[in-house]
Image: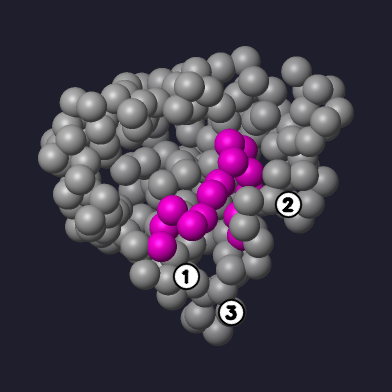
């Protein structure tokens, strides 16, 4: 079984590095163009047997664009949501440090178990995202695309790679980039990370 872990397209908050969390932020024009380029890339590969997305608008819209191009109806799964950043939502990293210096310092000391103010920790995201992957894998086969979020995808990759979650910021996923994990004989392995070849130069411009 192949699972494609795909980050949603760009939003205006991505463009200025604002934490989004569970915010209802839509794709911007570039994000929609990225989703169309992604759809063309997926259409050229093995047929998808299922398309599932987070229920947050930026991921759902990305999946809807892909689904319309491939003739698939996306399913939604709340377990694929981004980490809930609580009071950090809408702020830049610099603004978080300015407004919540003590909390940010605590997070820097233990980014795995320190929940954002009113939000989640990466440890909590690990539980729900791995459970979501297992649930989807139990009823799907072939090649499945999951449209999710940068933080959540990196948590899943750390889990599959056996990395301590404290290493999560050593991974980066671009908007609409593809990561791939495969399950063979009950064990998961990572095949690729941050594959964004479909977003380079003319590939993206042609779909704008």
Q: Is residue 125 left or right of residue 9?
A: left
Residue positioned 51% across, 55% down in the render:
171
Whether residue 25 is in magenta: the answer is no
Q: CA distance from mark 2 to mark 3?
A: 19 Å
| Vertical position of residue 176 compared to residue 114: above or below | above
Q: Along the polypeptide, which appears first: circle 2 or circle 3? A: 2
Residue 101, position as x, y percentages in the image: 18, 35
Query: Disc 3 designates what residue?
Result: 184
Say which element carries label 2. Answer: loop
Q: CA distance from mark 1 to mark 3?
A: 13 Å
| Vertical position of residue 160 compared to residue 8: above or below | below
Would you identify the image quadrant in which residue 72 lies?
top right
Judging from the image, the colouring scheme is one colour
Q: Along the polypeptide, which appears first: circle 1 or circle 2? A: 2
Marker disc for residue 160: 1
Whether residue 175 is in magenta: the answer is yes
Query: Disc 2 designates what residue?
Result: 47
Q: Is residue 166 left or right of residue 96?
A: right
Say which element carries label 1. Answer: helix
Q: Is residue 133 visible?
A: no
Asked if the residues shown at circle 1 and circle 2 are in contact, with their CB atoms under 8 angstroms apart, the answer is no
Q: CA distance from mark 1 to mark 2?
A: 24 Å
Which image quarter is the N terminus in? bottom right
Residue positioned 20% across, 45% down in the render:
105
Residue positioned 23% across, 57% down in the render:
110
Q: Name, please, the residue furthest toward the top.
A: 29
């Amino acid at each position: 079984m192949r699972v494609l872990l795909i980050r949603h397209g760009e939003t205006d908050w991505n463009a200025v590095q604002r934490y989004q969390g569970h915010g209802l932020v839509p794709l911007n024009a570039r994000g929609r163009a990225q989703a169309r380029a992604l759809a063309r890339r997926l259409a050229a590969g093995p047929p998808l047997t299922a398309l599932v997305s987070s229920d947050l608008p930026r991921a759902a819209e990305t999946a809807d664009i892909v689904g319309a191009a491939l003739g698939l109806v996306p399913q939604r799964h709340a377990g694929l949501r981004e980490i809930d950043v609580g009071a950090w939502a809408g702020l830049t990293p610099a603004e978080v440090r300015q407004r919540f210096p003590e909390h940010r310092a605590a997070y820097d000391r233990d980014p795995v178990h320190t929940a954002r103010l009113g939000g989640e920790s990466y440890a909590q995201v690990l539980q729900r995202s791995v459970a979501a992957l297992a649930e989807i894998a139990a009823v799907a086969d072939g090649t499945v695309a999951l449209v999710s979020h940068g933080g959540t995808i990196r948590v899943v990759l750390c889990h599959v790679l056996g990395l301590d979650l404290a290493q999560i910021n050593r991974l980066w996923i671009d908007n609409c980039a593809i990561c791939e994990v495969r399950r063979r004989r009950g064990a998961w392995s990572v095949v690729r990370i941050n594959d964004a070849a479909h977003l380079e130069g003319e590939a993206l411009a042609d779909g704008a």
